[in-house]
Amino acid sequence: MVERHFLYILLLLCAAPLAAHAEDTLPAGPSAFVLIARLHALPGEAENVVALSSAVDEKVEAGEPGMLLHTFDANPNDSLGFVWTEVYENSEALVLHLDNADLTAYLEAVSPLLDVFTVELYGAVSPDAVARLRETGTPVVHYPNVLGYVRDLTP
């Protein structure tokens, strides 16, 4: 009988911090989050994909202050594979990105040069922003927060 009560108390003590932390998930929308876009160029098109990506990168940097990080990386195991890594300040920044005419022109130009283009979202993204991204027709998987935090780096 004592063992059973001990196990019950142990279970409560272990579960309580997990439950409390899970309740503190980031609110969807006002939090920073990550977007990963995976691209795979058609044979002979990698240089063109890089050139188009370089041009849009400069335009995004100049016109989207809510884009906190925007990198285009090469797959070390596949010379035709690339990854956009993007960190957004909040869901509104993603909507602004989707409304960017330069992005629309880039996607129209680069899509015929690709055989794969997928997007993964990681974090507390508003349902509206996720829906807007899915409206583009791009395959999207959203990994919502279970727990975690965004550190405040303001001075």
Image (tube, helix red, strand yellow):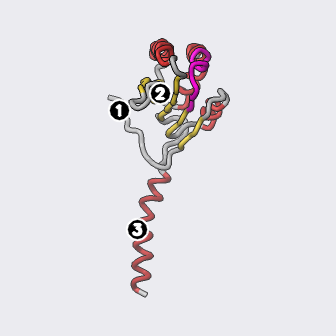
Secondary structure of residue under mark 3:
helix
- Above or below for 118 versus 112: below
Residue 155: x percent and y percent? 32, 29
Report the residue marked by disc 1.
153
CA gap between label 3 and label 2 equals 47 Å
- Rendered residue at 62%/38% (across/down): 127
| Callout 2 amino acid | Gly
CA gap between label 3 and label 1 equals 33 Å
Report the residue marked by disc 3.
13
Name the N-terminal-most of marks 3 and 2.
3
Mark 3: few/some/many CA within 10 Å (<14, 14-19, 20+) = few
Name the N-terminal-most of marks 3 and 1.
3
Locate the N terminus and report the quarter of the image it occupies: bottom left
Residue 11, image quadrant: bottom left
- Rendered residue at 57%/29% (across/down): 116
Front residue of 60/49: it is 49
Report the residue marked by disc 2.
81
| Callout 3 amino acid | Leu
Query: Outermost residue, left direction?
Result: 155
Residue 7: x percent and y percent? 42, 77
Mark on residue 86?
none
Front residue of 2/56: it is 56
Q: What span is in magenta? A: 108-118
Residue 115 belongs to the span the image colors magenta: yes
Q: Nearer the viewer, mark 1 or mark 2?
A: 2
| Callout 1 amino acid | Leu
CA gap between label 1 and label 2 equals 33 Å
Residue 59 in view (yes/no): no
